[in-house]
Amino acid sequence: MTTLASNNRDMGIYLHIPFCRQKCTYCDFAAYQNLEDYYDAYVAALLDEVRIWCEMYPESTTIPVDTIYFGGGTPTELSIVQLEKILKTLDVYFPLQNVRQVSIEANPHNLTTSYLSDLYALGCNRISFGVQTFNDRLLHMIHRNHIGREAVDTIYQAYEAGFTNINLDLMYALPSQTLVDIESSVHTAVTLPIHHISIYGLQVEPTTQLAYAIKQGQLTLPEEEVEMAMYDYLVSTLPEVGFNRYEVANFAKEGYVSHHNLRYWHYKEYLGFGVGAHSFYNHYRRANHAYVIPYIKAVEQSVLPIKTEEYIDRQRDKEDYCFLHLRTTTGIYASDFEDRFGLSLEEEYGVVIRGLMDKGLLTSKDNRYYMTDEGFVHGNYVFAQFIK
């Protein structure tokens, strides 16, 4: 088994805030509306979970923290006081002196300049807005509670509040969405003071309201060739306007990558706290309870709210390392693979790599292997070749 202990070892911390003012029809994440009465109890439980973890795994408290990420749900549903309590608790238990990025996800709806300024003053230096589209008809259809103009105004407010690292999410292949809609949203986005764009093709999850509406014939998805035209437009246009692709779905101006998300793709450790949060630590992947009440009750009994736990053996270790690195445009460095696992990439995956290169899905340069443009289109197929 490879060891994760090294002088370069650091940690990311993810904090899940599962509350939304209004849940989107496509969402199957651990996110819930109409739970305002539980906000205080949830924050208290989250702080207790951090304490319990650190008491059970004290060695983790010695690892320098590199990134902190508030995800959701909608973390900005919490008050500044509640968010400050969370950050102060982390500071009690973890070495935060070298944290380089504190990210928070936000809904553009009803955010004031005062709130955004206070967020920045807390130490949040990156903010990510779930815009999805600037088209009001589409926003209403997917149950977003903001309008396009509000998203524009809020992004400017965030910039004026001090944020110089701003992301927005855009979705494509939404029901009734057209290529013109995508072009319009991109044209609006690139006029804003943003530094990063994430693009997500709609995934219709079977338990969502959206899946039900499609099944009932109330909504119709774009044809496959229209979806591909949207994708092609996004991945070709964003680099032309200064947003360079560095991962399957992520584009950034120079120096503005999401360092926390890069931890996932670079196969580095992170701890997750909160409902539905995931961790990867000391060769174990863990996932918390996905529902608020069971989560709170577990923590109240001084029990870690872990729902599943999986040990990552050597074979799975190599597989995860390869397909996660291949999500990035950097890909896999053969020398890094050998340093980590004590064997050559060619020895372990040479046949797979040559087969993918013959298909035009993988290429190589300077001792690294990475996906071609066509490889990104067929990423799931490429990833699967590294899994035995």
Image (cartoon, rainbow, N blue to C red):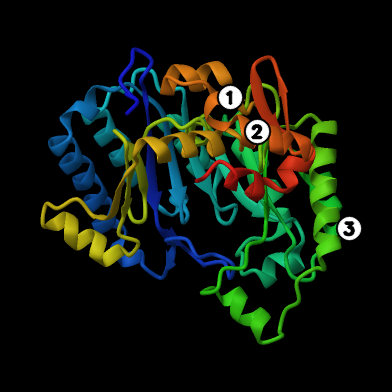
The three-letter code of the residue at mark 1 reads Glu
Which numbered disc, 1 or 3, marks the residue closer to the eye?
A: 1
Residue position marked by numbered label 3 in the rendering: 180
Asked if marks 1 and 2 touch (Cβ < 8 Å), the reply is yes
Q: Please report whichever mark, 1 or 2, sits nearer to the chain's N-terminal start.
A: 1
Q: Nearer the viewer, residue 122 or 253?
A: 253
Is 195 drawn above or below residue 176 in the view shown? above
Name the residue at the bottom extreme. 216
Disc ID at residue 346: 1
Q: Please, what is the three-letter code of the amino acid marked with disc 3?
A: Val
Q: Residues within 10 Å of mark 2 (few under 14, many from 20)?
A: many
Numbered circle sitting on residue 353: 2
Q: Position of residue 98 (x, y in %)?
A: 38, 18
Task: Give the number of marks.
Answer: 3
Determine the CA span between mark 3 and mark 2: 38 Å
Task: Give the residue at the far right of this rendering.
Answer: 180
Q: Residue at x 65, y 83 (%)?
A: 215
Visible residue check, residue 128: yes
Q: Amino acid at mark 2?
A: Ile
Precedes in sequence: disc 3 or disc 2: 3
User: What residue is rendered at 44% in x and 54% in y?
Assistant: 77
Image coordinates of residue 369 in percent, x first then y, are 66, 26
Q: Position of residue 320 (x, y in %)?
A: 47, 39
